[in-house]
Amino acid sequence: MAWNRDDMARRAAAEVQPGTAVNLGIGIPTLVANHLAADAGVMLHSENGLLGMGPFPYEGDEDPQLINAGKQTVTVVDGGSTFDSTLSFAMIRGGHVDLAILGAMQVAQNGDLANWMVPGGLVTGMGGAMDLVSGAKRVIAVSTFRSKGGTPKLVASCDLPLTGVGCVQRVITDVGVFDPTGDGFAIVELAPGVTRADLGDDVPFVD
């Protein structure tokens, strides 16, 4: 059985080291906050100006002034702080974010990432992704293994507009965990019940 969205977020949370500053992208990555131990000392960073982001609030406890970069209401852990986006991006560009967990449309075998637009689609801009993939010390992409149309998201080279070059160290999908090696993708772990044959032969893997 493939992992669901929550399973993928739980697996991504296992990559987070205690005492680190972590930025979570929009979509599945936001769910990672729900799987981090409260005593791990992890400080979640949001590029709109928040360090110390906690899990989503319970219904009725929302504070409309506390939001993440996706405009979802969030909570703040003890010791958290807020500031303007200029300082927030200075943290990113200064290399003070230890890990960025982002969504992906495509990841190439050399670690290139495309996650911000499909040509012809309506977008308002790249957001903070370009800064995050170049400024964070480690980048993990979280996405389904295939698009809704069935095409693989792990590819030899991206044909969508790039967010960053050679920036992704690990990809967590609904069928398993994979590392880009430059020559293909190494299989780190497969979801329970998933076999190598289930992955198909249209993704470049290395032994």
Image (cartoon, rainbow, N blue to C red):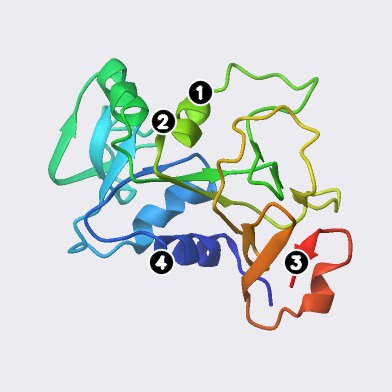
Element assignment for label 4? loop
Q: Are marks 2 and 1 in contact (CB under 8 Å)?
A: yes
| Cα distance between the residues tagged 2 and 3 | 36 Å
Quarter-wise, where is residue 14 in the image?
Answer: bottom left
Mark earlier in primary sequence (3, 4) = 4
Residue reaching furthest to the front: 183
Q: Which residue is mark 1?
A: 127
Q: Which residue is mark 3?
A: 206
Q: How many other residues sit within 10 Å of disc 2, few (<14), some (14-19) or many (≥20)? A: some
Q: Amino acid at mark 1?
A: Gly
Element assignment for label 2? loop
Mark earlier in primary sequence (1, 4) = 4
Circle nearer the viewer, 2 or 3: 3
Q: Position of residue 75 (x, y in %)?
A: 25, 43
| Cα distance between the residues tagged 3 and 1 | 33 Å
Q: How many other residues sit within 10 Å of disc 1, few (<14), some (14-19) or many (≥20)? A: few
Residue occupying image coordinates x 72% and y 78%: 194
